[in-house]
Each structure stands twice: as C-alpha cells, then as structure tokens.
Image (tube, grey):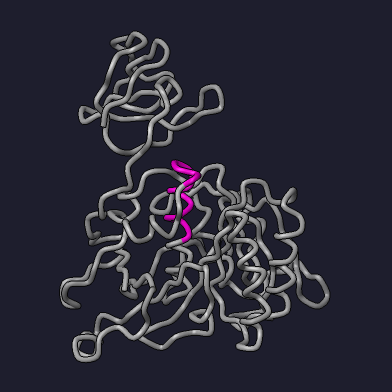
Amino acid sequence: MKVVVKDFLNVRVGAPQLDAPCYQYLAPGSEIEVLDELVSGHAYEGISTWLVDAARNYYWSGGVHPFQIPLPQRVPEARSWEEAVNTYPGKGTSVGVAILDSGVYLPHAVIGPRIKYFESFLYGNSKTILSSHGHRVAGILGAEKDPVRNQSDLFMFLVSKDVHVDSYAVELALLEIDAKPQLFPGLRLINLSLEIQPSYVARLQPIIDKLYAKGILLVVAAGQDGAPTVMYSLKNVVKVATFDPSNTATYRRHGFPLKDCIYFLNYPIPTFGKTDTQPDSSIQDDSAYCAFMTSLLARRLELSSNENLFDYTRHISSPIRSVSEVHPFTPYLI
C-alpha cells in the first residue's frame, strides 16, 4: 500500500529502531510503498509502531498521514510453534489481559514482572498458587523470551484451586473488571481456560455482554475432540477448541460437531514451569490454545486497537479442506 509522508521522515535500515542506520530523509508529501502490516519497535512521541517495505527499510508510523491497514490475508499454515508465532507481528505491548485461573508463581523471574494486578476471589482470599495450571497459562500470555515473546500486562484473578473452577468467583471477578476499569489500564481481553458450572451461563452472559460493549472480549476454552464444554454455550466470546490428529477418520465421517469455533490440532505448547528448578513445561488441550488465541489477539490489538476482533479471527483462520492436511499451531475456523 502507499502512504504519504507528513513530516521529514528518516528511512531506517535493518530494524525499527531510532538508532538504526539512516541513509535517506524523505520530504513531506513523498509517497512510499510499504507492506500491509505494522511492526513494533522503538517508541517516539508515544508511538512505537513502524511501517516496513519489501526491502526491510523501516519508517516510523507517526511520520506519515493517517492510513488504514487492510484486513490481513489468511496467514500461511504454520508447521511449527516458532513458525506460528513469527507469522503474527506485535508483542501485545500496552494491551492488558485478564487471566481467570488458579494463580501464578509471583517470584518467577519472567512471569512475575508481567503480573500488574493479583486478586483472589476464593474463600480465605489467599494469594497462594494452588496449582500450576494458571502459571503455565500465564507463561503463554506474558513471556518475553522465545518462542512466546508476548509482553502484555497481565491481571491475575484467582478463581480456582485446580482445574475445577469456582463459578461464583468467576462472576465476582468479571463484575470487578466491569466496575473498576481504573484498576486495569489497557485491559481488552479476558482469558478463561477453565469451565464454569452450567447454572452460571445465564448469570454470566449479561456481564459478558456488557464488557463486550465496552470493547473487552472474553476468550474461552470451548471443547476437545468434538465434546463441548459449558463455555461453548456462551455468546459474544471467542470459542477455542482442539482436536486430536489421530481421530481423522471420525472427522472425515462426521465432520466437526462444534460450529463457530477456532480449532487447533492438539499439540503441547511450550511454557514455563512453576519454579527455577522446573524452568520449562508445556500445556495442551483447549485450555492451552485458548491462551494461545488470546495472545494472537493481543498482538493484533497492539497494532490495530479499533479492529473488530471477530473479523480478525475469521481472517487469520484457515478453512479445513481436508483433515489430513492440517498443520500444528494454525487456527482453523469451523
């Protein structure tokens, strides 16, 4: 696409950085042909997004007249975790993500600094991590090192002692997010990788609708291998499901029973263990890919904060032509 230079603009070579080599200045009114994407780089005057051309020259986005990034083309189907995370620009910087789960190990050197808020809604109001599930989910959403490379601010709400969630605690957490937005600056996404009780669907839906109207979107774990969770019945949420690649015959015969879902092949996702003595771990199933999808949406919001995320999920997701041709870490829209 073409953009028009607003002020004198440096052409930075090799990296979106203010100290990268500069071989040319562009005068106001100059037109430049750039790719249909933004990348994250050094901040200048509060703007940290950069345009890039086919030769990998970088242009600070604040130096051109307003432009509209077209909706992205469907992404190439990834064949590895690293390939998948490299497909999506951005790091989720300045995008807040709430995690409703079983807590996090706050002293952890990488995840701990990303936790900007921690509150327990369980009886006794403990901040003690009660299982490693929430910690591993947080490792997908807030780790700075490869292969995850997300830098979202995380707000942790303790709503579960293990994988069995306290549904009333979830309700209280969502009400807190709605009532006290000043405590959660930049919050746009809520990750709920656990399953509530069926009786709470009707209670939570009005709160979810209210948050959605404010621009805060819930991403939920909706099912595995065609078996829906209770979360599948929620509306105005992004639903994530997984399927086992060994069950291809079943899917060929019967199709995918869960509609309006983002499907992933069920492979383990690398994340952090609880302590320094267990530095690496992994997590899989719909709870893991719920966090992975949330991380992709956070990256997009960093670059295009006003975009409809439901539209974006449709554009980054590939249609399944044949179950035998699907690839790991690629979102498929059913």
The residue positioned 41% from the left and 22% from the top of the image is 65
Q: Is residue 176 above or below residue 255?
A: above
- x and y percentages locating residue 78 in the rendered image: 25, 59
Residue 237 on image: x %, y %:
51, 68
Q: Is residue 22 above or below residue 33?
A: above
> Is residue 241 rendered to the left or right of residue 80?
right
Q: Main secondary structure of the magenta part?
A: helix
Q: Which quadrant is the C terminus positioned in? A: bottom left
Q: In screen coordinates, is 299 left or right of 121?
A: left
Residue 122 coordinates in the image, percent (x, y): 76, 75
Percent position of residue 160, x then y: 66, 77
Which region shows up in magenta?
294-306
Instruction: Say which quarter of the image contains residue 103.
Output: bottom right
Quadrant of the frame with the N terminus: top left
Residue 297 falls inside the magenta stretch? yes
Total labels drawn? 0
Residue at 45% in and 45% down: 91
Q: Which residue is situated farthest in the right direction here?
A: 124
Q: Residue at x 30, y 82 (%)?
A: 244
- Hey, which quadrant is residue 253 in on the image? bottom left
Side of 176 relative to 96 (left or right):
right
